[in-house]
Image: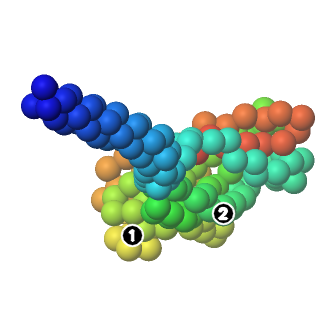
Amino acid sequence: MSGERQGEEISRRGFVAAVAAILGGVMSAFIGLPAIAYVLAPGLKKTDADAWVPLGPVDALVVGEPTFFTFSRTKTIGWEVNAISYGIYVIKKGEADYDVLSNICTHLKCHVSWKKDLNHFVSPCHNGHFAKDGTVLSGPPPRPLDRFEYKVESGRLSVHVLDT
Ligand code: FES
């Protein structure tokens, strides 16, 4: 009789221990999982990879004359934050017609600049020359200057930037 009673007590203790372990696990998960998610979430988050960047009123642009714009964007991937600088030439060709060109040479990524006396762009690194519309005139660049998509809304020009 006392042997049976001892067996019951052991199983009762085992049951209580099992319930305590299960409740402890549930409570730990209830508290721990949100804390882990809170810590890891920034590392898994990415910023939008593209955006429309406003450059200003089109009335300020002179027809036929390249105007240079610079801006930078911050790209965040997890805990890593990078500032990316952009240089863009806008050439107004008419009331609603623009060339929006990158200032990055398509050869080895030197910055091209507009040479008014030559009436074209020059890449200083290897003497690459680009016409006002971005096409290659001479030198090693393999292709024209990259173009940006643009839009004009309420008289203001914006360019579409795709961060890489
Ligand atoms: S980087 Fe422009 S010509 Fe080489």
Amino acid on which disc 2 is placed? Thr
Spot the residue most to the bottom.
Answer: 125
Residue at (39% x, 54% y) in the render: 106
Q: Mark 2 points at which residue?
A: 70
Q: Residues within 10 Å of mark 2 (few under 14, many from 20)?
A: few
Q: Is residue 163 above or below residue 149?
A: below
Q: Is residue 89 visible?
A: yes
Q: Residue furthest left?
A: 3
Q: Which amino acid does label 1 sit on?
A: Asn
Mark pair 1, 2: CA separation: 23 Å
Mark 1 or 2: in front is 2
* Mark 1 close to ligand 1, CB under 8 Å: yes
Along the viewing direction, whichever of 150 and 39 lies nearer the viewer: 39
The mark that comes first in sequence, 1 or 2, is 2
Quadrant (top left/top right/bottom left/bottom right) for the N terminus: top left
Secondary element type, mark 1: loop
Q: Which of 85 and 129 is in front in this view?
A: 85
Relative to 97, 123 lies left or right = left
Q: Residue 127 carries which label?
A: 1
Residue at 67% in and 37% down: 150
Q: Is residue 29 left or right of residue 71?
A: left
Residue 68: x and y in percent read 68, 61
Could you tell me if residue 18 is visible in this image? Answer: no
> Residue at image x 45%, y 62%?
80
Residue 79 sits above or below residue 7 on the image: below
What residue is shown at x 58% (from left), y 59% (from top)? 74
73 versus 98 height, above or below: below
Q: Mark 1, residues whose alpha carbon is within 10 Å: few (<14), some, or many (≥20)?
A: few
Query: Residue 28 placed where, x, y %?
Result: 41, 46
Q: Mark 2 CB in 8 Å range of ligand 1?
A: no
